Image (cartoon, grey):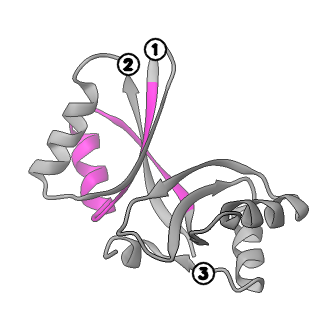
Amino acid sequence: MKCDQLSIFLENRAGRLAEVTRLLSESKVNIRALSLADTSDFGILRLIVSDFDKAQAVLKEAGFTVGKTSVVAVVVDDQPGGLHNLLEMLRSSGINVEYMYAFVQQSGSNAVIIFRFDRTEQAIELLAENNIKTIPSDELCKL
C-alpha cells in the first residue's frame, strides 16, 4: 500500500521552513513524518500529513513548488537486526531504497519506516509475500 508524500522544494535561506510550518499550522494540517535534505542552494522537505490535498493546495497557493511522491510505510521489528533483515530481503530481490526516514510514534514492539523504492510495486508485492505489514496513508495519520 502506497502513501502520498509531499515533496516541497525550498530555497536554503532563513525562515523558509518556518513559512511551510506556519501555513500548515494555520490550515490545521498535522505533520506526521518528515525528512529534510539540503544542498547549499536548496532543500527538499518531504512530509506525510493529515490532509494531503489541503496541504498541497495551501502550499502551492503560497508559491511553493510541491510534488506528490508515492512512498511505502513499512512496519519493522523494533529490535536489533529488524531493519537489516528487511533491507537484506530487498537487496536480494534487486530492489533499491532511494531514501527512507522514520515515522515517530509511541514506543512499542514495532517501528514504522517510510521508504521510497526504485520499484515500488515490486517492493509492495515482496513485502506482502513475506507477511510484512505496510500502512496506508489514512491509517498512518491516525497512529
Please tell me whether residue 67 is drawn above or below residue 82 in the rendered image: above
Mark 1 to mark 2: distance in Å? 5 Å
Q: Alpha-carbon neighbours of circle 3 within 10 Å: few (<14), some, or many (≥20)? A: some
- The residue sitting at 39% across, 79% down in the picture is 139
Q: Which residues are magenta?
A: 43-71
Residue extending farthest top: 40
Type of amino acid under label 3 = Lys
Answer with left or right where residue 11 lies relative to residue 1: left
Q: Earlier in the sequence, mark 2 or mark 3?
A: 2
Q: Look at the picture and state if 99 lies above or below 63.
A: below
Mark 1 residue crowding within 10 angstroms, few (<14) / some (14–19) / many (20+): few
Which residue is identified by label 2?
Answer: 12
- Between marks 2 and 3, how big is the CA–CA gap? 36 Å
Can you give x and y, in whole percent of width and height, for residue 72 in the image?
57, 65
Q: Report the front residue among 35 and 105.
A: 105
Residue 133 numbered tag: 3
Contact (CB < 8 A) between labels 1 and 2?
A: yes
Q: Which residue is mark 1?
A: 41
Please identify the quarter of the rendering in which residue 64 is found.
top left
